[in-house]
Image (cartoon, rainbow, N blue to C red):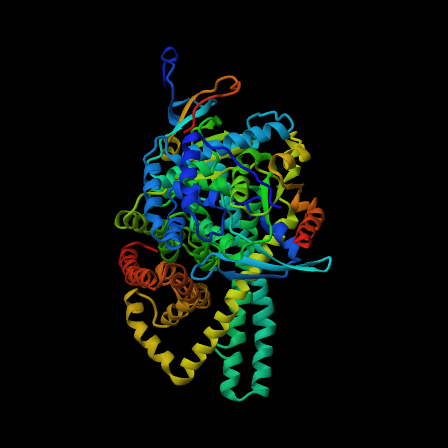
């Protein structure tokens, strides 16, 4: 029934297979010949399986495998070579004469040649992140949805209805200061969704054009300085959209070492789009303040990454990536990918924002909230911020972007220097609850705890130093 | 199954009609999508595996894919490859065949291959491997109804 | 760069100029994992490689695929000048 396809390997290999086959009497998921080939290539998992199946015969098997391991050239290379030869022969037979010319046109070349590639990269990032996400998403859309729709319509109506139909404490839950609608839904739909949505659109656009691998290879050198390689640019950039999603995507990195470093960097120094958009909006009035923020966060990113690279053991992973041709994006594909990402985001965010509102409401009712905020006032005042800002840091823990959004509400009362300190500290400060949850799930509890324990004091320390530094500068 | 970025998921979505259940492989964070396909009176479970380059796993995802082949004992493996890279991707087909699994080879992304001026002699390829071969351009839906027919026919024969 | 008259049997990919067309002579991977990665990517002795760029990183073409590699990985690929299509190639492989 099944075709008896066979690749003929070199006599040496066939001889080794021939010696192994009579010893493989157990029950295997693959044909004995395939099992023998994997054993000969030193496959651990198969060896364990064989050890269980063959009992005493495994000793003899090990002897043969050991012999095979000493061959030069390595056996896995010879096996791959034999397969490749066969593939080549078949391809020649069945594929119409290919005209093998170098791939890539002029545009392609421009995105790779460093003197043009880096300016193009800068332009893409400027228009994509600053103008489209930061300007259109974080300002125009937020102004419209949050300002026009929520502040003017949804929140007042919710307050009105809640006051009429619900008991005072329940009304507070729905439409109070930390209410599900007035805080949770307003931040989620009014502030965060437009920013994250525009970012995901931008990211899907880059993905669909085939630009992402170029981004990876252009960033490879820079990534190496923080112990990563170009491959990490994809999760790190995605982190600018949503750090939680990006932490999940660090899976695509090859070694545990890289995954830990990337998770750490995402938690510490990569602001997510909701945060980023608001920060840019908050600091827009003062280019100097924005510059200081970029400088401080950038320095922390490089220093912390460099240190992590030094501290964590293990070899650096080499970089390789397939480079697909650039192509015109298809709107349908972009919209499909954007929608899928927004859907994922909403599924992830909804329970968290409902939970956050619920928890805050509960704490507020019991007076715990005041206690926590009271406790946070001391470090917050050390940063030269008004005591009210303590609330922002608390919110920031539940969702980073809520923290920044809270800051947005407070902005009128803060000086530029205070805003700079607050935004910088919030950027570095603990990742949001969802991100911590994903960190625990992906990296395990010890690593996650270690990362968080490293970040909190670091964030406050940097904020504290910055506060004192800025005291000297005229801002 | 197939290497990363060859259009596996599009084909998977077509076959399952989007009725998909994503789960984590036990004890790992590698996501596996499963879906049901009902066609011609036959109901099948379809599994979308993480990308794999070879049977000798390098990454964790590849390890999971290989373990799936053991534990699920699939009735048929649909190996999706990028048509223009036939030569580079055939070795994985060989390994599927060596393992003794039933194979349906799908040369995907035919639009790109044609643009490069490539053509394929399907009967010759079928003879060389001893399995059925399908040409497809999954993003445009080309070849997918045929794929569905062959999958159903194969399972009906069991 | 190598002098022509020396006709080196093979040299790491990183020693050859851009636009060079060669065949993989050998793989100098240090670890088994590195070797497995190269083999899985289809970088196998006998395969033709065309060097397209060396900066910002190495970009090579194999068949109809372009691959970007960093210096460390490119160094493990040993190339020799492409010879005319091997007629009934008989190189040993085991």
Relative depth, front residue between A215 and C10? C10
Q: Is residue A98 left or right of residue C12?
A: right
Relative depth, front residue between B117 and A359? B117
Q: Is residue B109 left or right of residue B22?
A: right
Where residue A197 sits: x, y (%)?
A: 56, 57
Q: Is residue A300 left or right of residue A253?
A: left
Answer above or below: position of A250 versus A360. Answer: above
Res. A113 in view: no
State the residue at coordinates (47%, 58%): A245
Answer above or below: position of A92 versus A206. Answer: above
Q: Image quadrant of residue B15?
A: bottom right
State the residue at coordinates (61%, 73%): A153
**Residue that protrudes farthest toward the bottom in the picture:** A167
Where residue A231 sits: x, y (%)?
A: 43, 44
- The quadrant of the picture occupied by the C terminus of chain A is bottom left
Res. A370 in view: yes
Q: Image quadrant of residue A359?
A: bottom left
Where residue A362 sits: x, y (%)?
A: 43, 81
**Residue that protrudes farthest toward the front in the picture:** A22
**Residue that protrudes farthest toward the right in the picture:** B40
Relative depth, front residue between A387 and B47? B47
Tell me how many marks there are.
0
Relative depth, front residue between A221 and A93? A93
Where residue B155 sits: x, y (%)?
A: 66, 53
């Amino acid at each position: 029934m099944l075709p008896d396809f066979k690749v003929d390997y070199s006599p040496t290999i066939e001889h080794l297979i021939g010696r192994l086959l009579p010893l493989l009497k157990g029950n295997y998921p693959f044909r004995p010949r395939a099992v023998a080939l994997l054993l000969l290539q030193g496959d651990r998992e198969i060896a364990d399986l064989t050890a269980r199946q063959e009992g005493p015969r495994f000793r003899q098997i090990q002897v043969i495998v050991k012999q095979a391991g000493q061959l030069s050239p390595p056996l896995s290379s010879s096996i791959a070579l034999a397969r490749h030869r066969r593939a080549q022969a078949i391809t020649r037979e069945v594929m119409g004469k290919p005209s093998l010319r170098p791939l890539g046109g002029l545009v392609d070349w421009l995105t790779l040649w460093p003197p043009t590639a880096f300016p193009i990269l800068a332009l893409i990032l400027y228009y994509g992140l600053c103008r489209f996400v930061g300007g259109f998403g974080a300002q125009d859309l937020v102004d419209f949805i949050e300002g026009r729709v929520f502040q003017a319509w949804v929140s007042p109506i919710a307050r009105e209805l809640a006051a009429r139909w619900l008991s005072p404490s329940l009304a507070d839950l729905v439409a109070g200061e930390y209410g599900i609608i007035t805080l949770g839904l307003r931040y989620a739909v009014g502030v965060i969704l437009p920013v994250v949505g525009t970012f995901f659109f931008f990211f899907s656009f880059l993905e669909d054009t085939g630009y992402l691998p170029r981004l990876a290879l252009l960033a490879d050198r820079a990534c190496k300085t923080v112990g990563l390689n170009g491959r990490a640019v994809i999760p790190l950039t995605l982190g600018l959209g949503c750090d939680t999603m990006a932490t999940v995507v660090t899976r695509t990195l090859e070694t545990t070492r890289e995954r830990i470093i990337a998770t750490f960097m995402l938690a510490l120094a990569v602001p997510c789009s909701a945060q980023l958009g608001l920060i840019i909006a908050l600091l827009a009035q003062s280019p100097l303040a924005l510059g200081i923020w970029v400088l401080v966060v950038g320095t922390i990113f490089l220093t912390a990454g460099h240190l992590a690279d030094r501290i964590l053991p293990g070899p650096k992973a080499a970089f390789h990536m397939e480079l697909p041709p650039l192509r015109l994006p298809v709107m349908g594909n972009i919209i499909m990918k954007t929608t899928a990402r927004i859907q994922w985001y909403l599924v992830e965010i909804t329970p968290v924002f409902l939970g956050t509102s619920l928890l805050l409401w509960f704490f507020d009712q019991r007076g715990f909230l005041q206690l926590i905020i009271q406790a946070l006032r001391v470090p917050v005042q050390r940063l030269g911020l008004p005591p009210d800002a303590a609330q922002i840091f608390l919110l920031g823990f539940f969702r980073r972007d809520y923290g920044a959004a809270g800051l947005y509400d407070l902005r009128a009362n803060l000086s530029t220097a205070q805003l700079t300190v607050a935004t910088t500290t919030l950027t570095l400060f603990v990742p949001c609850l969802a991100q911590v949850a994903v960190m625990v799930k992906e990296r395990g509890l010890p690593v996650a705890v270690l990362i968080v324990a490293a970040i909190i004091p670091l964030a406050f320390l940097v904020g504290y130093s910055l506060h004192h530094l800025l005291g000297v500068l005229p801002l | 199954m197939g290497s990363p970025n060859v259009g596996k998921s599009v084909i998977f979505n077509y076959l399952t009609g989007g009725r998909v259940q994503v789960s984590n492989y036990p004890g790992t964070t590698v996501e596996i999508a499963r879906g049901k396909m009902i066609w011609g009176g036959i109901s099948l479970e379809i599994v979308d595996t993480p990308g794999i380059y070879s049977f000798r796993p390098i990454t964790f995802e590849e390890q999971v894919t290989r373990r799936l082949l053991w534990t699920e004992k699939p009735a048929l493996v649909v190996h999706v490859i990028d048509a223009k890279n036939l030569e580079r991707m055939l070795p994985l087909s060989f390994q599927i065949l060596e393992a003794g699994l039933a194979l349906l080879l799908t040369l995907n992304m035919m639009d790109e291959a044609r643009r490069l001026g490539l053509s394929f002699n399907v009967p010759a390829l079928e003879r060389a491997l001893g399995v059925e071969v399908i040409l497809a351009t999954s993003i445009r839906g080309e070849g997918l109804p045929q794929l569905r027919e062959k999958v159903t026919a194969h399972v009906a024969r069991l | 760069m190598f002098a022509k008259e020396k006709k080196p049997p093979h040299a790491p990919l990183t020693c050859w100029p851009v636009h060079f067309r060669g065949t993989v002579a050998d793989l100098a991977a240090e670890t088994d994992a590195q070797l497995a990665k190269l083999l899985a990517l289809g970088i196998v002795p006998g395969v033709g490689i065309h060097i397209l760029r060396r900066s910002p990183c190495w970009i090579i073409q194999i068949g109809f695929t372009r691959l970007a590699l960093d210096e460390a990985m490119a160094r493990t690929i040993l190339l020799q000048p492409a010879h005319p299509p091997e007629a009934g190639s008989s190189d040993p492989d085991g």
